[in-house]
Image (cartoon, grey):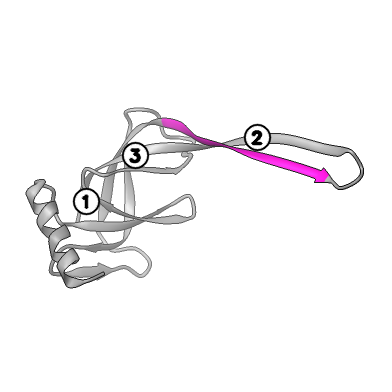
Amino acid sequence: MSEETKTAEKKEVKKAGKSSRFAVIETGGKQYIVREGQRIEVELLADAKEGKDLTLDALLVGDDKTVKVGKPMVEKATVKVKVLGDIKGEKLIVFKYKAKKNQRKKTGHRQKYTELEITKIEI
């Protein structure tokens, strides 16, 4: 990514009134880079009810000038999220067959996700 596009992205973030603070969180065995006001889809959280507020620990927190990396978590750094609800992903078709045996099996799968909105990143 060139310097021009990086500075253009920073200006867009400032124009939108969003903070330039970001964090890396881990949930469902995956890591996500998040900013305040952003919506993300994560693996299904069983205990999360719609409208509930959750607090997640941050692996890394930063802004335009500084970055704090945790070992493994940054002390006193949390990310507050609001659960927007459970959703399903696109349907995947699983088709198994054995050649020359007239043996076919077609099934489908829809992964369940929890949609979160990042409300605040605290350091």
Q: N-terminal of the two: label 3 or label 1?
A: 3
As shown in the figure, which amino acid type bears the numbered disc 3? Leu
Q: Which residue is mark 2?
A: 108
Relative placement, left or right, of 71 versus 107 is: left
Say which quarter of the image contains residue 51.
top left
- Front residue of 99 and 91: 99
As shown in the figure, which amino acid type bears the numbered disc 1? Ile
Q: Quadrant of the C terminus?
A: bottom left
- Front residue of 105 and 34: 105
Between circles 3 and 1, the one closer to the viewer is 3
Q: Main secondary structure of the magenta part?
A: strand
Relative placement, left or right, of 78 versus 71 is: left
For the view shown, which residue lies furthest in the front direction? 100
Residue at 9% x, 53% y: name it.
14
Image coordinates of residue 36 in percent, x first then y, are: 21, 47
Q: N-terminal of the two: label 1 or label 2?
A: 2
Asked if labels 2 and 1 touch by Cβ distance under 8 angstroms, the answer is: no
Relative placement, left or right, of 102 versus 2 is: right
Say which quarter of the image contains residue 64.
bottom left
Q: What is the span of residues highlighted in magenta in the rendered image?
A: 86-97
Q: Which residue is mark 3?
A: 116
- Front residue of 43 and 69: 43
Residue at 24% x, 62% y: name it.
61
Image coordinates of residue 23 in percent, x first then y, are: 27, 57
**Magenta segment: does it hold 27?**
no
Image coordinates of residue 19 in percent, x first then y, are: 13, 52
Q: CA distance from mark 3 to mark 1?
A: 14 Å
The residue carrying pointer 3 sits among few (fewer than 14), some (14 to 19) or many (20 or more) residues within 10 Å by Cα, namely many
Q: Quadrant of the N terminus?
A: bottom left
Q: CA distance from mark 2 to mark 3?
A: 26 Å
As shown in the figure, which amino acid type bears the numbered disc 2? Gly
Residue 121 is labelled as 1
